[in-house]
Image (tube, rainbow, N blue to C red):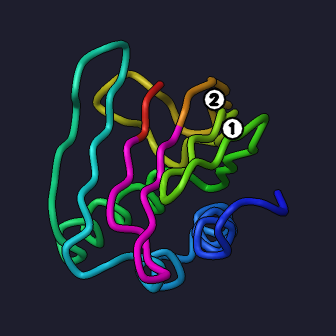
Amino acid sequence: MRDLPEVVVRYLSAYNKRDVEGMLACLSEDVSFRNISSGSETVELTGRAAFEKLARQGAAAFSARRQSVLNYIVVDDLSVLDIEFTATVAQDMENGWRAGQELRFSGASAFTVRDGLIVRLVDES
């Protein structure tokens, strides 16, 4: 991952540790975030405070989680990563996932970086 911007590497490391403060330190104040699942947008938000709320919910939902980078490309300020996501569900959830259930799926994350911070993040699975 030698070509990835250092802030993206730090963000992924913090994400994998469920370190919300570490994740937030990588984001601009006006960060834009979108999540797309099965072709439908499930979340769209702007701002570090809104992202923090979502990140804390996500960290609590899983007893362990990991994004592994399978492949990536960097062009100017955009880094697009093929990701494998694995996690263990921490508690029963409304969507039918059960505590202790192991999850594994593939997706992509696109990071836009400016002035050393992530200004836009789009996750798709």
Q: Please tell me whether residue 121 belongs to the stretch shown in magenta.
A: yes
Residue 125: where, in percent of width, then height?
Answer: 47, 24
Q: In which quarter of the image is residue 85?
A: top right
Secondary structure under the numbered disc 1 in the rendered image: strand
Which mark is first along the chain, 1 or 2?
Answer: 1
x and y, in percent, of residue 24 in the image: 41, 79
Q: Is residue 40 magenta?
A: no
Local packing at callout 2 (Cα closer than 10 Å; few below 14, some 14-19, many 20+) is few
Q: Which residue is drawn at 67% across and 47% down?
A: 67
At 47% from the left and 53% from the top, the residue drawn is 111
**Quarter in which the N terminus is drawn:** bottom right
User: Number of labelled discs?
Assistant: 2
Q: Give the range drawn in magenta.
A: 109-122
Farthest top residue?
38
Mark 1: give few (<14), some (14-19) or many (20+) Cα within 10 Å: some
Residue at 68% from the left image edge and 37% from the top image edge: 86
Residue denoted by label 1: 86
Residue pointed to by mark 2: 103
Marks 2 and 1 in Cβ contact (< 8 Å): yes
Would residue 93 be found to the left or right of residue 41 on screen? right
Above-or-below relation of 28 to 4 = below
**Residue 10 location in percent, x, y?**
65, 74
Task: Give amino acid for label 1.
Answer: Thr
Outermost residue toward the front?
A: 76
